[in-house]
């Protein structure tokens, strides 16, 4: 029986291709570019206690290790998921010994996923961080301003790492494909730039995912005796793109925010794209419907009162049908809202009225408007269905009609009835205070 050929690599390509120098590091130019603050600090031999915050696969762990190597410091690693307070104290003692026995430079204490630390674990590190006995560097995929003890966070700098662009990933993939020492160079597989860009675009800004896709597809080509990686192989081998989305965290709020702001900005293409992102991520349909209803009232408002009817009907329809049919129903609603004229006058009116009440503007109900009060004039008794009558003891102005869609007509009607809605002597409508 013929033995199977021995694999040269058992370590994943993403691990083998970790950058060894700052110059090999991909992306994050806002903090590691030629004149960026963190790059300058590292080149001067300084490492600040800091939090590296960002999604998976953008180089957080790699950057911590480069911080240590670039500044010639010892690095002590600990995982926040399993670490105990006693282990943290041992780490601190070891860091103090390294500083005393070495050249006086503080070691780096690297805490992966530091948000898993409870308050007691985080507080155990405080004295050493304050004294400078240890440089604390934590990584987290969760928002540190929500998850990290404020006392500890106040002694650290937060660097936010972004998903990697295709322009950052393509050179990394090229190097991995040709590198014979650590990469896939021995396979002698060729690939056009367009193919590598496709791999990069399907990785969702995740370098680890991009390298994993490259390793799988290039390996499959080599196993079949081929020498060229094509778009067809990439699409067949890894058909689904990686999509970053966490229904309970920042992605949840960022994507719905993008949808609402695209509707507000009257861009139906962007709006339907963000809707699709929400739907493909498995976001709760009722959550999406609630936000669309709010947008109809807040952003379209009285410029097109039918927008609320469309949004409410879509919410009912989506709830009744579920996915996948709900996607079509919500698409129609989102495109309608994005294309409709916009007005936030109703939102601003009730906001200003609430503010006035909160500041003590508490008027009594006029006697003629009270239940059983005398002197009330019924507008329906007048052929105009309107009569000059006081509805507040002291007049106030909260509603300022927009001049788009149906609201223009409403404003013109109110100008006929109330002096405060009429244009000023300069021909301009009264401005909101």
Image: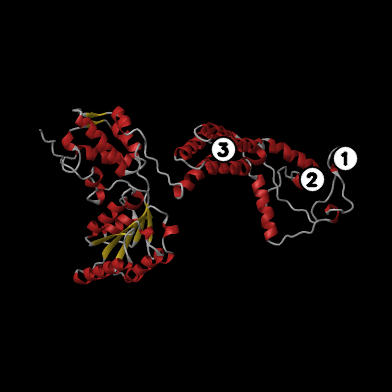
Q: Say which mark, if any, is on residue 319.
A: 3
Residue ranking furthest to the front? 1
| Nearer to us: label 2 or label 3 | 3
Kindly report the distance in space between the C-alpha atoms of the residues bearing marks 2 and 3: 43 Å
Secondary structure of the residue carrying numbered label 2: loop
Name the residue nearer the viewer: 254 or 102: 254
Mark 2: few/some/many CA within 10 Å (<14, 14-19, 20+): few
Residue position marked by numbered label 1 in the rendering: 382
Residue position marked by numbered label 2 in the rendering: 418
Describe residue 9's horizontal placement relative to residue 335 as left or right: left
Kindly report the distance in space between the C-alpha atoms of the residues bearing marks 3 and 1: 45 Å
| Of callouts 2 and 1, the N-terminal one | 1
Mark 3: few/some/many CA within 10 Å (<14, 14-19, 20+): some
Q: Say which mark, if any, is on residue 219.
A: none
Q: Position of residue 23 (x, y in %)?
A: 25, 49
Toward which corner of the image does residue 289 lie, by quadrant?
A: top right
- Is residue 171 among the parts visible in the rendering? no
Residue ranking furthest to the left? 1
| Nearer to us: label 2 or label 1 | 1
Name the residue nearer the viewer: 11 or 363: 11
Q: Position of residue 111 (x, y in %)?
A: 31, 59
């Amino acid at each position: 029986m013929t033995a199977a050929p021995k694999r040269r690599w058992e370590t994943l390509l993403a691990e083998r291709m970790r950058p060894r120098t700052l110059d090999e590091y991909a992306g994050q130019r806002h903090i590691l570019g030629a004149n960026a603050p963190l790059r300058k600090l590292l080149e001067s031999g300084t490492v600040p206690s800091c939090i590296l915050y960002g999604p998976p696969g953008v180089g957080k762990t790699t950057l911590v290790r480069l911080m240590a190597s670039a500044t010639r410091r010892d690095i002590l690693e600990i995982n926040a998921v399993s670490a105990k307070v006693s282990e943290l104290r041992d780490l601190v003692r070891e860091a103090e010994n390294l500083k005393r026995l070495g050249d006086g430079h503080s070691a780096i204490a690297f805490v992966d996923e530091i948000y898993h630390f409870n308050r007691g674990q985080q507080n155990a590190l405080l004295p050493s961080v304050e004294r400078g006995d240890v440089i604390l560097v934590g990584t987290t995929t969760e928002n540190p301003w929500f998850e990290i003890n404020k006392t500890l966070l106040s002694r650290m700098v937060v660097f936010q790492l972004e998903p990697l662009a295709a322009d950052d990933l393509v050179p990394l993939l090229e190097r991995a494909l040709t590198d014979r020492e650590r990469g896939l160079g021995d396979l002698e597989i060729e690939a056009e730039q367009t193919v590598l860009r496709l791999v990069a675009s399907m990785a969702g800004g995740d370098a680890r995912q991009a390298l994993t896709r490259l390793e799988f597809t290039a390996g499959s080509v080599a196993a079949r005796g081929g020498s060229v990686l094509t778009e067809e192989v990439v699409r067949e081998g890894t058909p689904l793109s990686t999509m970053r989305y966490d229904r309970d965290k920042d992605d949840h709020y960022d994507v719905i925010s993008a949808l609402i702001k695209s509707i507000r900005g009257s861009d139906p293409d962007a709006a339907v794209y963000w809707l699709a992102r929400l739907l493909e991520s498995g976001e709760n349909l009722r959550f999406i419907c609630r936000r669309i209803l709010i947008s109809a009232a807040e952003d379209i408002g009285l410029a097109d009162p039918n927008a609320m009817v469309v949004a409410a009907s879509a919410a009912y329809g989506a709830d009744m049908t579920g996915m996948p049919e709900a996607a079509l129903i919500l698409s129609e609603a989102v495109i309608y809202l994005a294309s409709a004229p916009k007005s936030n006058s109703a939102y601003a009116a009730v906001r200003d009225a609430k503010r006035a009440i909160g500041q003590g503007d508490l008027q009594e109900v006029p006697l003629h408007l009270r239940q059983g009060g005398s002197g009330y004039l019924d507008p329906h008794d007048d052929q105009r269905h309107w009569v000059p009558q006081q509805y507040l003891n002291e007049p106030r102005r909260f509603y300022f009609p927009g001049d788009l869609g149906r609201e223009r007509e409403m404003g013109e009607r109110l100008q006929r009835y109330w002096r405060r809605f009429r244009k000023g002597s300069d021909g301009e409508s009264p401005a909101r205070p």
